[in-house]
Image (cartoon, grey):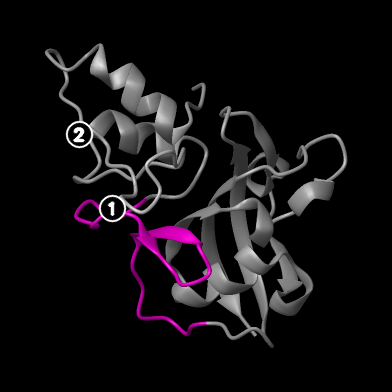
């Protein structure tokens, strides 16, 4: 299944509103009306859930899927809750994940490689360090990472351009 970025899904759904239903229009931050990252204001629809889960783990049926924003500007929504152990920045985590750009282009996926990856949280981009502390073992989270918490003006090789907003779905398998 081809993945559609969250913003494009909302636009695409507008054409299908009669047959399948879509969330109400998105809201833009009142402090920055020109903001391009938009937040869904109602629970996710069936079609959006199918697109998000394409190639990932299963999310909770009743999860509240409105994006939250931390003081740093990281946006997140917990897709599967868990009472499991939460990581600290000093921990090593094992995860499965899929990452894509605003355009919807996937740039990395442990799911496609067929194996999870382990790394110390203090050795990755700040958006991951912060975001992975918001979900417990066994949980799944979607992260919208602004450029300053990602790869910034340098980007990352040919797969992530400079100043890119990064999107991830991450399943936290274990914390040690």
Q: Position of residue 121 (x, y in %)?
A: 69, 76
Q: Position of residue 153 (x, y in %)?
A: 79, 48
What residue appears at the point 22 percent right and 13 percent down from the top-left corner? 16
Taking 105 as reference, is 29 left or right? left
Q: Earlier in the sequence, mark 1 or mark 2?
A: 2
Mark 2 = which residue? Answer: 23
56 vs 143: above or below:
above
- Looking at the rendering, the stretch of residues picked out in magenta corresponds to 59-86
What residue appears at the point 56 percent right and 29 percent down from the top-left corner? 104
Whether the residues at callouts 1 and 2 have beta carbons within 8 Å, the answer is no
Taking 114 as reference, is 133 left or right? left
The answer to whether any part of residue 87 appears in the image is yes
Residue that sits furthest to the right in the current view: 157
- 3 or 72, which is in the foreground? 72
Q: Quadrant of the C terminus?
A: bottom right
Q: Position of residue 125 (x, y in %)?
A: 72, 64
How far is disc 1 from disc 2 in space, using C-alphas?
Answer: 11 Å
- Classify mark 1: helix, strand or loop: loop
What residue appears at the point 56 percent right and 34 percent down from the top-left corner? 102
The answer to whether any part of residue 137 appears in the image is no
Numbered mark located on residue 154 in the image: none
What residue appears at the point 66 percent right and 52 percent down from the top-left corner? 147
Density class for disc 1 (Cα within 10 Å; few <14, some 14-19, many ≥20) is some
Taking 140 as reference, is 15 left or right? left
Q: Is residue 25 magenta?
A: no
Mark 1 = which residue? Answer: 65
- Classify mark 2: helix, strand or loop: loop
Density class for disc 2 (Cα within 10 Å; few <14, some 14-19, many ≥20) is some
73 vs 176: above or below:
above
Taking 157 as reference, is 133 left or right? left
Q: Is residue 84 magenta?
A: yes
Dominant secondary structure of the residues highlighted in magenta in the image: loop
């Amino acid at each position: 299944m081809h993945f559609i970025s969250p913003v494009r899904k909302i636009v695409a759904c507008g054409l299908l509103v009669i047959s399948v239903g879509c969330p109400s229009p998105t809201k833009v931050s009142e402090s920055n009306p020109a903001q391009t990252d938009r937040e869904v204001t109602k629970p996710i629809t069936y079609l959006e859930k199918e697109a998000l889960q394409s190639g990932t783990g299963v999310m909770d049926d009743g999860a509240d899927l409105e994006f939250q924003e931390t003081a740093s500007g990281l946006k997140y929504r917990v897709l599967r809750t868990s009472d499991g152990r939460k990581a600290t920045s000093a921990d090593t985590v094992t995860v499965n994940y899929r990452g894509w750009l605003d355009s919807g282009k996937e740039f990395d996926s442990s799911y496609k490689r067929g194996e999870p990856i382990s790394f110390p949280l203090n050795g990755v981009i700040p958006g991951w360090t912060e975001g992975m502390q918001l979900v417990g073992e066994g949980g799944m989270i979607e992260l919208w990472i602004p450029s300053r918490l990602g790869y910034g003006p340098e980007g990352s090789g040919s797969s992530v351009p400079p100043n890119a907003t990064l999107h991830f779905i991450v399943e936290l398998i274990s914390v040690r």
